[in-house]
Image (spheres, rainbow, N blue to C red):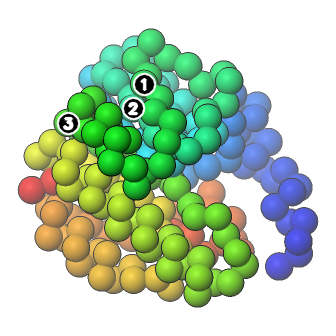
Amino acid sequence: MAANSYEKPDYWSRKAFSEGYPARSVYKLKEIDEKFGMIRKNYRVLDLGASPGSWTVFVLRALDGSGHVTSVDLNPLAKNVKGENLTFIQGDLYDADVRRQAMELGPYDLVVCDAAPPTTGNRVVDTARSTGLVELAVYYAQTMLKAGGNFAVKVFQGGDQQALLKTMRGMFSSAKGFKPEACRSESFETYLVGLGKK
């Protein structure tokens, strides 16, 4: 893969900036929402690994002043990511205090996670780290989603995708993998979607 292929703004990046989103990842959530109907007015939504904030902005726009969004990340959100119904928690998802704060703002109708580990370029290491993050996001969904709630999480292909889906099938009425068109062709990321928490 060419080292600079991620630096050139592609179609999705240009579209994102022109529509006021901090990053191209927004279109992945848009496709997931269009296919699975994840977001509804008045929902309480937890966005894990939210920075720079494209998914948060998309959810805020979909809620249109209703409901509430709680976003969590080690890094701050982009300056233009604001909302009366937005709470941002800056910290590590593994931190007990961060979990407590997120829990207090729940329970949630939807948990989404587009977090990715810092990549090393070693696919085995990166996939293992991604799997760890997915397991953590599943834990948040398990403990903070309302009955009937939905969940979407990014995972690197080649990890324990089948084992993760098996866990999710125990938690949700339906769980499946989905690769949005907005994922880069060379990317080995995909998404796991859980619908209707039991």
**Looking at the picture, does residue 159 appear above or below residue 56?**
below
Whole-percent x, y for residue 23 in the image: 68, 43
**Looking at the picture, does residue 119 appear above or below residue 53?**
below
Label 1 close to label 2 by CB (< 8 Å): yes
1 and 136: which is toward the camera: 136
Q: Residue at x 75, y 35 (%)?
A: 17
- Dot 3 or dot 2: first in sequence order is 2
- Callout 2 environment at 10 Å: few (<14), some (14 to 19), or many (20+)? many
**Looking at the picture, does residue 159 appear above or below residue 78?**
below
Whole-percent x, y for residue 50 in the image: 52, 42
How far apart, in angstroms, are the residues tagged by discs 1 and 2?
Answer: 5 Å
Question: Tag 3: residue type?
Answer: Pro
Question: Tag 2: residue type?
Answer: Thr
| Quadrant position of residue 59 | top left
Whole-percent x, y for residue 173 in the image: 14, 62
Q: Is residue 111 left or right of residue 34?
A: left
Q: Residue at x 35, y 67 (%)?
A: 135
Secondary structure beneath dot 1 equals strand
| Quadrant position of residue 186 | bottom right
Q: Quadrant of the C terminus?
A: bottom left
Q: Is residue 128 left or right of residue 45?
A: right
Q: Which residue is mark 1?
A: 87
- Callout 3 environment at 10 Å: few (<14), some (14 to 19), or many (20+)? some
Q: Is residue 64 visible?
A: yes
Q: Is residue 196 left or right of residue 55?
A: left
How far apart, in angstroms, are the residues tagged by discs 3 and 2?
Answer: 11 Å
Question: Tag 1: residue type?
Answer: Thr
Q: Is residue 157 visible?
A: no
Secondary structure beneath dot 2 equals strand
Q: Which residue is mark 3?
A: 107
